Image (cartoon, rainbow, N blue to C red):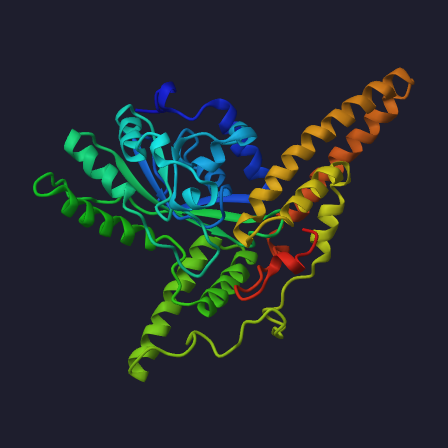
Amino acid sequence: MGKPPRSAALDLWHRWVLTCMRRASFVRVRSGGAVPGPRRRPRLIVSSHRNGAIDGALVQSAFPHAQYLVSMQLLRGPLRLLFTGIPVIRQRDVERYGMDRSSVNDPVSAGVDHLTAGGDLVIFPEGTSEWQHTAGAYQRGAAKIVCRLQEAGVDVDVIPVGLFYLAPERFGTMAELWCGPDVDLPQDTDGPRIEREKRAHAILSEALDAVSVHCPDPQTFDIVQRRATERARAGESFAASFLDEQAAAVQSVTSADTVDGGPSAGSAVSAEPVTASGPASAATAAPSPWPRRLGIALHWLLAPVLLAGWLAGKKADARNTVSFFRSLGGSAGVVIWLLIVAAAAVWAVLAGAGATAGAVAGAGLLSAAAGRLLLRARRWQPDTAPLDTAPLDTAPLD
């Protein structure tokens, strides 16, 4: 089948915007797991929601032409230049912004129409994102869409996707998405729709849990995140390492509960505490921050853009929105900085210093390329702060 028809595909402008946001925020983005082969029919991508609006940019790396169910708050004002999709008005949008759900089309019906037209669709069943130890409550929108498509005789591939971030509040880190196998849903159109939706929802939830962050408690998450980070520095896939460590941790907690005869008071994964200031052994100590600091310093030509992004990130209300705020601030910084650079270039040419200006610009670009290579180095990837800390108050410049 190839690409979706143009009328049902994400337009070129927004594909470019999401690509820029992804590459500006992360130095490494990889796909793993059961990565889909050639597209045969419309695809419904059911994704975890970990890092705010930037999650869409991550999913787009594997599904470049897919459209999204998007919160209406991202489709207002200047943000429309950065985001597009099928609008959804969530309960929090009603409470926070006073939006009226009747002002937009039913997102389930719109999603069915989009897939029927041959497009790909991304849904975040949690509805909203939180940086926490497990997924939020899954909404039943994806199950409703699947059941209506079955009634209409429209076949789609349903693909669960988990998103994994090594340090979401830090600039220039790693992120990965992990694809599960196509979900095998029963082709059943008999019986009440509500019962079929419940069955489909249970199957989809289980498939998404299998490829997502789903730790039993915050302490376990901190340990699993740290161990997966250590393995990623050694060259392994961060997502695969996280899922592996998570499975082992869940098994450890379950075994401890069985032995003790009930739920344990804390994590049974390890006796070693995980705290913001707790001592680390030499084998697991965080790498030196200086190579990353040097890598950022080598981006001196783009210093105003990085500063704008960093200042905007300080305004984020949670760790999972830092990347998004930095993208917004950096986008504004890019526009202003390009205008300044263009004006400076014209002035330099008129003043007879065009060659010097070109040499400075070339040196700045080469320096930035070298800095990005340093940031891409796995061995210097940073740790994220434990869940019980407030990283926005003490976050370093990166």
* 3 to the left or right of 182: right
Residue 321 position in % (x across, y down): 54, 48
Question: In front: 315, or 279?
Answer: 315
Q: Is residue 246 above or below residue 335?
A: below
Residue 177 position (above or below residue 215): above
In this rendering, the answer to whether 357 lies above or below 309 is: above
Task: Please state the total of marks drawn on the protein image.
Answer: 0
Query: Which residue reaches farthest top?
Result: 350
Going by the picture, which residue comes out furthest to the bottom? 260
Name the residue at 62% across, 43% down. 326
Residue 40 visible, this angle = no
Q: Position of residue 121 (x, y in %)?
A: 35, 33
Residue at position x 39%, y 55% in the image: 135
Q: Quadrant of the rendered structure where residue 246 is?
A: bottom left
Q: Can residue 263 be seen in the rendering of this structure?
A: yes
In percent of width and height, residue 307 lies at 72, 43
Place of residue 28 in the rendered image (x, y in percent of width and height, measured from the top left): 55, 44
Furthest-left residue in this view: 190
